[in-house]
Image (cartoon, rainbow, N blue to C red):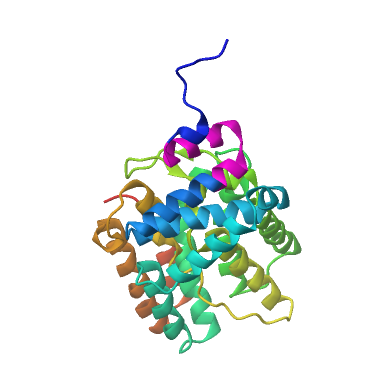
Amino acid sequence: MFNLFKKKASALPPEEQAADCLQRKDYPGLTRAYYHMGKAAMGAGELEKAMLWLSRADTIYSARDDIYEAVGEALTDDCSDRIGELEEAPLLSNQIIGQLEETVDGLGDAQVRVWSLLTLARLVPVGAALSALPGCEALGTLERCLDIVVQSFQEAITQEDFNFIKTTCGKLYALSDSEAFFAGGEVPCSAGAPLQVFDWNAMTTLLGIEGLLDGQLRNLSGEPVKDDGGLIPCALMPDYWTRTRGGGLKEIPQVQAELERIWGDLDFVRSGPTWAAVAQRIGEYKALDIFSA
């Protein structure tokens, strides 16, 4: 029997459309809902929200050809153009990336790689929590990968460890295009609102981790790859804070604290620390809750 009082999905506000499409696994519909949410936010001058929703739409339609074809080129082209425009806007994510790019150019590759590893250490607890979600199990292996990479700077690693990281890289790359990522679940978070695995969409965090790990394997194999520092700002978690708090990211205490850690890590790396000091700092970060006020 039909429920005459239930609104059609297309008649719902975009936020409710997104929830409805997600529940029904209507991914073209979910893409359209995110696109319209981003477009509306952009029109209202809420640029961080616009980047959040438009980037989510872009990730979903880029993940599968059937979704891309279903939403059509008019939407994908406009979405891409809008993201390009937002990448030039004075957003915190853009500003920090610009600052890091300038700074990284003046550092040695090993220094940049250690700087990136310090961020990865802070993401280890986040990955461990999200690994409980179906299809996200690989996120629970980040701690072991981190420890192996740190070891590889000091001594030879085993073939087993090399293969473990290589396998993890493949799983992270596959996860970035999977339903488990763009339509995955959520876990409790100390900041209050639940944490979604899709909150790692910002700054392409999954691919940043994969790139760091794969780059180290290539270096060990005699194919030097420089670390571009892309992972360094990822523990800012801009998608989570924009989705759950709104307003200016710079006003959020946890974001302010992470910015201090980023630049504090730079000073630490420049000081020429021993590996014992690096290990101690990493250990402290692996026990840190970046969502705690």
- Quadrant in the picture for residue 194: top left
Q: Is residue 121 left or right of residue 48?
A: right
Q: Which residues are magenta?
A: 13-31
Q: Is residue 148 left or right of residue 276?
A: right
Of 267 and 147, nearer the camera is: 267
* Percent position of residue 131, x then y: 55, 44
Of 97 and 124, nearer the camera is: 97
* Percent position of residue 151, x then y: 59, 68
Q: Is residue 269 left or right of residue 292?
A: right
Q: How many marks?
A: 0
Looking at the rendered image, the quarter that the N terminus falls into is top right
Main secondary structure of the magenta stretch:
helix
* Percent position of residue 286, x then y: 44, 56
Q: Relative to 255, does residue 212 appear above or below in the rendering? A: below
For residue 146, say whether it is visible.
yes
Of 82 and 149, nearer the camera is: 82
- Residue extending furthest top? 1
Of 86 and 237, nearer the camera is: 86
Q: Residue at x 42, y 79 (%)?
A: 98
Q: Residue at x 51, y 32 (%)?
A: 9
Q: Relative to 13, does residue 85 appear above or below in the rendering? A: below
Q: Residue at x 24, y 60 (%)?
A: 251
Residue 93 lies within the magenta run: no
Q: Residue at x 62, y 53 (%)?
A: 61
For residue 285, say whether it is visible.
no
Q: Is residue 215 left or right of residue 53?
A: right
Residue 21 lies within the magenta run: yes
Q: Relative to 207, does residue 287 appear above or below in the rendering? A: above
* Percent position of residue 83, x then y: 49, 65
